[in-house]
Image (tube, rainbow, N blue to C red):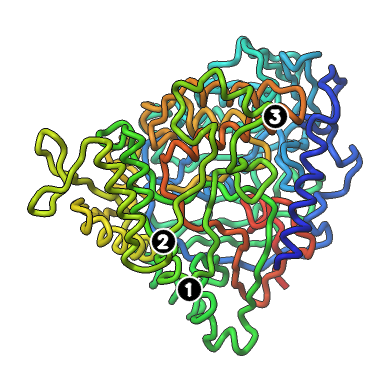
Amino acid sequence: MASKFLTGFRASVAALAVIGAASFAAAEPKHAIAMYGEPELAPDFVSLPYANPDAPTGGRMATAEVGSFDSLNPYVLKGNKPWQLPYLMAETLMGRTLDEPFTLYGLLAESVETGPNREWVEFTLRPEAKFSDGSPVTVEDVMWSYETLGTQGHPRYRGFWGKIASMEQTGERSVRFTFNTEDRELALLAGMRPILQKAQWDGVNFEEDGSGIVPITSGPYVVNDYEMGRYIEFTRNPDYWGKDVPFRRGTANLDTLRLEFFGDETTAFEAFKTGVTNFTREFNVARWESQYDFAAVQSGDILKAELTHQRPSGMTGFVMNTRRAPFDDWRVRDALLHAFNFEFINEAITGSKQERITSYWSNSPLGMSHDAATGRVLEFLEPFASDLVPGTIEGYSLPVSDGSERNREGLGNALAQLEEAGWKVDAEGVLRNAEGKAFEFTVLLQTGASETKAIIDIYVQALKRIGIDVTVNSVDSAQYKELTDAYNFDMTYFQRGLSLSPGNEQYAYWGSEYADTPGGRNLMGIKSEAVDAMINTLLTSESQEDFRAATHALDRILTAGRYVIPIYQWNISRIAHSKNLHFPERMPIFGDWPGWQPDVWWSE
């Protein structure tokens, strides 16, 4: 496993070396566009390198999902939607490859052209592009989609719309976007918005009534059947317009995709064991090693695979809401990190088989170093030194316990930090501030997340020993979404996938502008000029050195800010599936990631 990881790391470094290798330049219409340099695949490429263009069609994949849903429209804020829907339903002007950090190839668009400094971008639609009902995809549909999503759609679409100075039709099948700000990623982001059918929404309030509609899209699958909260079934469209587009060859091979929903992880696993579903991802390594010996595995009807990847760890753990006291004090957040006995928890839950996340971009060349900042990283951070949390510039690493249940040193450090922040344990053993208020908070979890609940239960017991009273509130998926959309929580489970090509999405994740936007992704509520400046720098960098340095600096600010209590990183994807389901041997850099499963799988 170690040798595979090192091989992947070197490949990732090599991929990033391409970034910045060539400067931006004006271009004639092309088949693809890269953030830096040139796309790797030539205009006459047959298929994506990790797809099998000769894969047979047919068969069925069914997965077990924990939770529920009450909407099939992922493009509006209202409603609780399965996370997979944007990937299964959306068709965009350009398609993102999982093998190059940020390169897009033509999908609905046959070509893309940019201005000398990427101050504008123009797309030309393929004449054969059609919606699932057979009607053509038009420039009018494109322009309506961009404006409607940007003004009435989910908040994640609105930031981009605000950076468009003008949008105009330049030909029968061409549309140009001109930008009002210097941001070289915008030319790529313009190719990644879902295109909806304007006619479907005539007379409909998109923002308020959109959650009750299944959007018509131009993708290879259509929703065939569903029951709210229980299942969704997609069927491959036999008349799909794009089957011969190079980006699509060897993808969308399965006739049927079905998402089955269950109330908890145990029931979902039983559904897989009994054949109700035929594909699963396992995130609990202890269960992977001890419970995947049932009859179907022993007979060979179910196959297991462990797949490596070269993407950053991202951040998974428990986020603290800095909009609320006392989590707005970094010393309190630091204390709660010291009290979290990861080494003991990891042994209890996984047998110490899972490596801990050490920063937001750990497991990649974009990850921060843990010693003092130097060079360009230091130069980027120094103007904000007085506002940065201790450790950001000097160097910071997560607390490490001795692995014992008592964690005396960790709890001692926690109490010392809490006292520094004005909290002391009284004669009754209750932690109180100077006003006599007890330290109490609630952890919000989603019903059915049994492993997450087990971790928190251990943590709650540790916090009791230093006088902190914690309530665990488990709610259904609809209520969980409602509460987190409104930032109505103290601490909750947090997961944020990050890539080798961080861009404008970083504003949505940690930008000040989005800290109070309902339904946003900045759950911790960061409002930091330093964070905003680092994001701007990585977006406007013209060299690989500055791009990486800005990302390293951003990683330091986020990690040393102690906003999240990190848990495991999944550098290995553990999947189990029916022996009839297959995937190509060639894995992309991003590994098991949206765009790979079920996209390049087939059945035979």
Q: Are marks 2 and 1 in contact (CB under 8 Å)?
A: no
Total number of numbered labels?
3
Left or right of 298, for residue 28? right
Q: Which residue is mark 1?
A: 351
In the depicted structure, whether residue 71 falls above or below residue 141: below
Q: Secondary structure at mark 1?
A: loop
Residue at 52% x, 71% y is 285
- Quadrant the N terminus occupies: bottom right
Q: First in sequence: mark 2 or mark 1?
A: 2
Residue at 49% x, 68% y is 284
Nearest the viewer among 594 and 383 is 383
In the depicted structure, whether residue 256 falls above or below residue 109: below
Residue 506 lies in what quarter of the image? top right
Q: Which residue is mark 2?
A: 66
- Name the amino acid, label 1: Gly
Q: Which residue is mark 3?
A: 547
